[in-house]
Image (cartoon, rainbow, N blue to C red):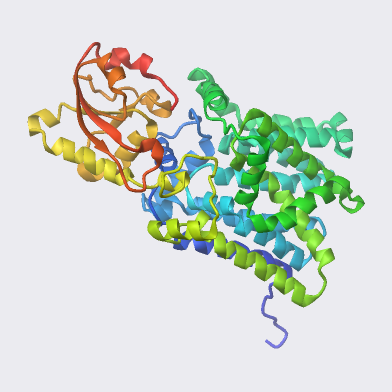
């Protein structure tokens, strides 16, 4: 027995495992903080009907969410578990990329800590939405590009195609990664391999992965293309370049800019980082495309993982003394702790509001609409269950024989998803809506003779119904302003049966 040794974890491995573990523990500990947001509830609603495609969501996160619900049910911890794991893996992989760039344990730890403290990454790990998948897809794709630059082995081309295909089916924002990767290949020595068969094998791999999605889109009239058009025309951020970049600094954390911004310059111009110059191209190309197309700043966040990694490698060369290294990591950790409430709901709402005022730090996650209370991305997590309670109160005032004649129609899919999720506790009828994926479900057997309508405009309702009565207006102290003072109507005497009117109710909110 004396010859046996207990397994030991290397310093470099520990440097990656520790930040990843902190990320995971934080999310699991506060998974039930605040409530489920509108986007999360919509994804949950989509997961009840697994498909190869959806109007505005990639199928991979939705199908994983469906599997997750089969295993863990609808507890908030279970619903948000995959997102927590995804961001923890992202933190770990960021350090791995730094390792491929020559960083030792300290450089890898710095890179991983930069990913750990980024408020946008923290928020991605808290909510069950595709944003975390976009970050992970970009991170893994960056690692594959690094291996391609180092080794040029055919296998990495195939893996790049696989990551690109699955990444696109997880988050459509991965299209920017694909475009940036193509330009990076053409702008670097990798372009020599374009004349070989393997880059094309990788492209075919990506296309094969996307075949089921394309078949679904074709069968349903390519609704995602229409959704893209609406997003670019109506929901583009509208920020000028300066504000876009300032918000990017907030999303990544103001302190980490001293790590990733010099890394961008080093990747672009330093001889030592010439082998990885493609990463500079990828970031610059992605930032340029997003600014030109008016994308919201948080979509650029995944592109910075390579810069975090390069920054870790640079800092390790610059800082040699132990006390300086300890100070550097300590400052990153303390800075991250100071902004932790912006990415994880560790504070009660009222405490958060006061804390935000004290530190003067406000992050938007691309949503510039604020209440005077909470930022929009937190505001959407309030009022969802309460709305179901309000609808229950409306139904409770009706005689039983009349109650069963009423259906629920919602102006947008998030309202419908909220009522479907929380309405089960009140035995509410299933909600219907003409918005996005809900439209494909149809009117749900309701004739429209009697409807409780949530969120529509009175003038629009009166063109469809002979009777329209305002029942109440719903609001919540912390509710997202887009849902403030939501009207609840009672409507009857439809001009045409709901099934006949349904094709004209299609919309993208």
Q: Position of residue 70 (x, y in %)?
A: 39, 47
Most distant residue in the bottom direction: 2
Q: Say whether residue 10 is visible.
A: no
Res 167 quadrant in image: top right
Q: Nearer the viewer, residue 1 or 232?
A: 232
Q: Position of residue 269 (x, y in %)?
A: 88, 47
Classify the position of the N terminus by image quarter.
bottom right
- State left or right for residue 115 relative to residue 388: right
Q: Position of residue 423 (x, y in %)?
A: 26, 41
Q: Nearer the viewer, residue 495 or 354?
A: 354
Taking 443 as reference, is 323 above or below it? Answer: below
Taking 257 as reference, is 370 above or below it? Answer: above
Looking at the image, how many numbered discs can be counted on the residues?
0
Q: Say whether residue 134 is visible.
A: yes
Classify the position of the C terminus by image quarter.
top left
Taking 448 as reference, is 124 above or below it? Answer: below
- State left or right for residue 186 relative to residue 224: right
What residue appears at the point 84 percent right and 64 percent down from the top-left corner? 317
Taking 388 as reference, is 330 above or below it? Answer: below
What residue appears at the point 71 percent right and 41 percent down from the top-left corner? 159
Q: Position of residue 464 (x, y in %)?
A: 27, 15
Q: Nearer the viewer, residue 332 or 153?
A: 332
Res 433 quadrant in image: top left
């Amino acid at each position: 027995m004396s010859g046996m040794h207990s397994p030991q974890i290397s310093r470099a491995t520990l440097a990656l495992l520790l930040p990843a573990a902190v990320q995971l523990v934080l999310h699991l500990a506060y998974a039930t903080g605040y409530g489920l947001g509108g986007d999360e509830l919509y994804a949950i609603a989509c997961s009840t009907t697994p498909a190869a495609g959806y109007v505005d969501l990639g199928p991979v996160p939705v199908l994983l969410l469906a599997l997750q619900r089969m295993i863990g049910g609808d507890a908030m911890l279970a619903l948000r578990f995959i997102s927590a794991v995804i961001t923890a893996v992202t933190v770990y992989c960021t350090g791995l990329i730094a390792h491929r760039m020559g960083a030792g344990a300290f450089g890898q730890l710095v890179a991983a800590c930069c990913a750990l403290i980024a408020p946008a990454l923290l928020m991605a790990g808290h909510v069950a939405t595709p944003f975390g998948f976009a970050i992970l897809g970009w991170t893994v794709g960056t690692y594959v590009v690094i291996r391609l630059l180092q080794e040029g082995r055919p296998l990495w081309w195939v893996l790049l195609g696989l990551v690109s295909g699955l990444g696109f089916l997880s988050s459509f924002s991965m299209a920017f990664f694909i475009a940036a990767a193509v330009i990076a290949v053409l702008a670097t020595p990798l372009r020599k391999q374009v004349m070989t068969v393997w880059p094309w094998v990788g492209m075919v791999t990506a296309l094969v992965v996307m075949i089921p999605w394309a078949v679904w889109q074709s069968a349903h009239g390519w609704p995602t293309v229409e959704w893209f058009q609406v997003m670019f025309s109506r929901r583009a951020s509208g920020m000028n370049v300066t504000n876009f970049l300032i918000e990017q600094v907030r999303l990544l954390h103001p302190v980490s800019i001293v790590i990733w911004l010099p890394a961008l310059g080093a990747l672009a111009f330093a001889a030592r980082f010439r082998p990885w110059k493609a990463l500079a191209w990828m970031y610059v190309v992605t930032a340029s495309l997003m600014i030109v197309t008016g994308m919201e700043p948080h979509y650029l966040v995944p592109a910075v993982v390579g810069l975090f990694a390069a920054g870790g490698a640079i800092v390790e060369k610059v800082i040699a003394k132990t006390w300086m290294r300890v100070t550097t990591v300590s400052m990153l950790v303390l800075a991250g702790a100071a902004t932790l409430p912006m990415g994880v709901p560790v504070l009660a709402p009222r405490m958060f509001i006061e804390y935000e005022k004290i530190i003067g730090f406000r992050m938007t996650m691309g949503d510039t609409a604020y209440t005077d209370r909470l930022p929009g991305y937190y505001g959407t997590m309030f009022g969802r269950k309460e709305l179901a309670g309000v609808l229950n109160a409306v139904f409770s005032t009706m005689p039983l024989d009349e109650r069963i004649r009423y259906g629920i129609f919602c102006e947008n899919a998030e309202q419908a998803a909220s009522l479907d999720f929380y309405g089960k506790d009140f035995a509410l009828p299933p909600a219907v809506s003409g918005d996005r994926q809900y439209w494909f479900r149809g009117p749900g057997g309701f004739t429209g003779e009697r409807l409780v309508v949530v969120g529509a405009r009175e003038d629009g309702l009166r063109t469809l119904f002979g009777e329209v009565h305002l029942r109440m207006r719903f609001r919540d102290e912390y509710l997202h302003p887009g849902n403030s003072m939501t009207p609840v109507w009672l409507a009857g005497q439809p001009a045409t049966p709901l099934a006949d009117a349904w094709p004209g109710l299609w919309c993208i909110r």
